[in-house]
Image (cartoon, rainbow, N blue to C red):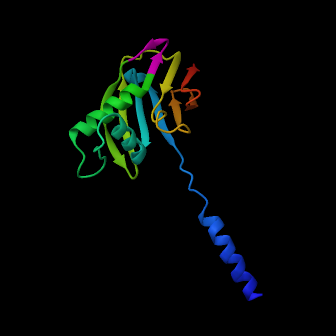
Amino acid sequence: MKYFRILFLVLLFPMVSATPAHKFYVSITKIEYVKEKSSLQIITKIFIDDIEDALQQHYDPSISLDTKKETEAADEDLKKYILQKINIKVNGKTVTFDYIGKEYDTDMVVAYIEVKNVKELKTIEIENKVLMEMFPEQQNIVHLKTPNSRKSLILDKDEPNGKLNF
């Protein structure tokens, strides 16, 4: 019986260890409509290693985030990349972003963006193509919070745009 168990483990180990690891490609963007400030406050979270790969491919192969090697140019490239990949229309009109900055939280980069002068929110159209050129299975989850409701979208390569009505 002992011989049978050992044989079973010897045969099982190669099958288990040969299974490839599956990586999950996702970003999360939280948008809050703050009526008192007439603004959309946006926080987007992206895994550092994934965004670093994208920045290296698009701008500079030596970019390194969240390390002592990080440069101001890397920060500017991150800003440029995010602002190119996320677009928002409020009430049918394209809005401009104020990129406030970024910080790191464990293995994620957290970017802060604001849209000012949003007096009323009837509709919001969101395009989020972050990392979709890098990873075909990328999903960008968007959560929107207003004083009266909460809504969410899951955007992917086949549907990088979504619209919410209020």
The quarter in which the C terminus is drawn is top right
Q: Is residue 151 rendered to the left or right of residue 116?
A: right
Residue 97: give x, y in percent of width and height.
35, 23
Our reading of the magenta stretch's main secondary structure is: strand
Q: Nearer the viewer, residue 157 or 107?
A: 157
Q: Nearer the viewer, residue 50 or 120?
A: 50
Q: Quadrant of residue 156?
A: top right
Residue at image location 47% in from the left, 29% down from the top? 129
Residue at image location 39% in from the left, 43% down from the top? 53
Q: Is residue 140 rendered to the left or right of residue 57?
A: right
Residue 151 drawn above or below residue 7: above
Which segment is the magenta one?
88-95
Specify the farthest residue to the bottom: 2
Residue at image location 40% in from the left, 48% down from the top? 49
Q: Is residue 147 magenta?
A: no
The quarter in which the N terminus is drawn is bottom right
Q: Quadrant of residue 51?
A: top left
Residue 40: give x, y in percent of width and height.
42, 25
Q: Is residue 91 magenta?
A: yes
Q: Nearer the viewer, residue 39 or 54?
A: 54
Q: Is residue 112 rendered to the left or right of residue 19?
A: left
Q: Quadrant of residue 10?
A: bottom right
